[in-house]
Image: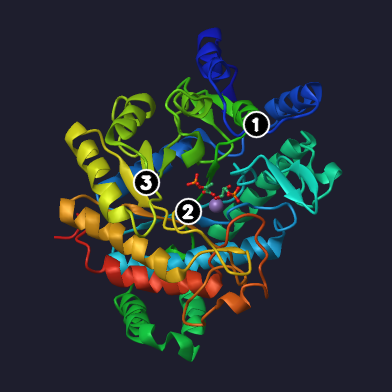
Amino acid sequence: MFEDADEETLAAISQWREKPAQHQPAWPDPAALEDAVAYLRSLPPLVFAGEADQLTSEMAAASRGEAFVLMGGDCAESFADSSADRIRARIRTILQMAVVLTYGASVPVVKIGRMAGQFAKPRSNPLETFGGVTLPSYMGDAVNGYEFTAEARTPDPHRLVEAYQRSASTLNLMRAFSTGGFADLTAVHEWNKGFMANPAYARYEQFASEIDRAMRFMRAAGVDMDNLRTVDLYSSHEALLLPYEDAMTRIDSRTGEPYNTSAHLLWIGERTRDIGGAHVEMLSHVSNPIGVKLGPTTTPQDALALVDKLNPEGIPGKLTFITRMGAGKIREALPPLVEAIRQDGRPVTWVTDPMHGNTITASNGLKTRRLSAIVEEIDGFFTVHQDLGTHPGGIHVELTGGDVTEVLGGSEEISEDGLGERYETLVDPRLNHQQSLEMAFLLAEQLRDVRFSVWP
Ligand SMILES: O=C[C@H](O)[C@H](O)COP(=O)(O)O
Ligand SMILES: C=C(OP(=O)(O)O)C(=O)O
Ligand SMILES: [Mn+2]
């Protein structure tokens, strides 16, 4: 399925080594890093080239307004939370949201987990000081431990191998859950009815009962519900750790093209999207669908340079811009980028990340976000695309399947005082299960007003 690269291809893939690489851990033992990378190179791919191609074509549909993308998962996955129960809860949340969004948009929802590999984080500060002691910041379980001790915080390359293993077992469960009956539309709909049983969500009752009627109609009209028992669920993560991503880059024997086999879709973070940097160089050589986070300082020239580098031929679905502007900035910051890309003509899939531009510090010092700001950024994203006649292609969110208290607001209001109760995230605050579903209902109401291009 995958074969050895010829010299020319290898040389092309390796060009990232000549470029400046931001946000790489200071590995104390380079020989141990090399050993871990050599071992990873000998391990099988986690995803297959044909699956990545399938996702490219689905991202292309989203760029044309014929599908809507839902990407979601932890800010930072952890080894401890890659248990069956936690993975199942996250997948269940994504599936429940997807049903609501599918009804709202009346187009297929492309489901992508921010999981099975989201184990590395860029940090604002490489060092953290606590009680007079300064140590390396936590950079994700693929690099170091969260515990504030010198031992845990020292980057350890064995963690790269564990990240691969955890990714493999997570992906195995994702595949099992998406095809083994867990994703059955009828069952997912029943879970949503369970959510709606809480009077806190009474304002979504009408929408939920419309979905219920649609389900009854499908059954009455003779739709074979047995055909609606499986879904496609893709994996994605930020391609941050270059040696790991390089080790997972393999040659597809069908086409001779390199693919990053650590996930279906890889994205480049806001902090590493420098056009002359190693991350952009690395992903310019693989055939997967690629995302790039774009913050409010992005210029139209930056966006066009990324298209030139990452999708010079304008392959539909190949390049997704994940904008994370902030609720107060998106209405000014996004239009010039969308205009420039439209004039250029090469297709881009536009996705909104309404989380990372809306991070605040609560009075008790915890990092948080307001659900109202998240919803406001989504609203700005839709408004900009509606005004320009372009397609809002999807949403990228940080969420978890559990009942955490990390994001403020929601109908089961989480206040600043309640934040500390179950604040479990290792890096950024995530929507809990209920807030995720509530956001899906709010978004679905908005999607109903969007004119998707498959509609007559
Ligand atoms: O998503 C992650 C964070 O926004 C990023 O890693 C920076 O976090 P920090 O400011 O806590 O370092
Ligand atoms: C670090 C992240 O985002 P960004 O690169 O947009 O800041 C993230 O998605 O967790
Ligand atoms: Mn984050």
Q: Nearer the viewer, mark 2 or mark 1?
A: 2
Instruction: Tell me which amino acid carries mark 2.
Output: His
Please give the name of the residue rendered at 68% of the width and 26% of the height, measured from the top-left corner: 41
Label 3 – label 2 distance at C-alpha: 11 Å
Please give the name of the residue rendered at 44% of the width and 85% of the height, measured from the top-left corner: 201
How dense is the environment of label 2, judged by Cα within 10 Å: few (below 14), some, or many (20 and up)? many
Q: Nearer the viewer, mark 3 or mark 1?
A: 3
Q: Does 392 appear above or below 101?
A: above
Provide the secondary structure element on which disc 3 rests: loop
Q: Does 239 appear above or below 231?
A: above
Would residue 2 be seen by someone viewing this image from the given angle?
yes
Q: Does 357 appear above or below 373?
A: above
For the residue with label 3, is its CB less than 8 Å from the closest atom of ligand 2? no
Residue 143 x %, y %: 72, 40
Q: Image check: 352 left or right of 415?
A: left
Instruction: Tell me which amino acid carries mark 3.
Output: Pro
How dense is the environment of label 1, judged by Cα within 10 Å: few (below 14), some, or many (20 and up)? many
Quickly name the residue at label 1: 244
Label 2 – label 1 distance at C-alpha: 25 Å
For the residue with label 2, is its CB less than 8 Å from the closest atom of ligand 2? yes
Instruction: Tell me which amino acid carries mark 1.
Output: Tyr
**Nearer-N-terminus badge (3/1):** 1
Viewer-nearest residue: 17 or 123: 123
Please give the name of the residue rendered at 79% of the width and 36% of the height, measured from the top-left corner: 156
Residue 21 x %, y %: 57, 26
Quickly name the residue at label 3: 296
Q: Image check: 311 left or right of 125?
A: left
**Nearer-N-terminus badge (2/1):** 1
Q: Image check: 395 left or right of 10?
A: left
Quickly name the residue at label 2: 356
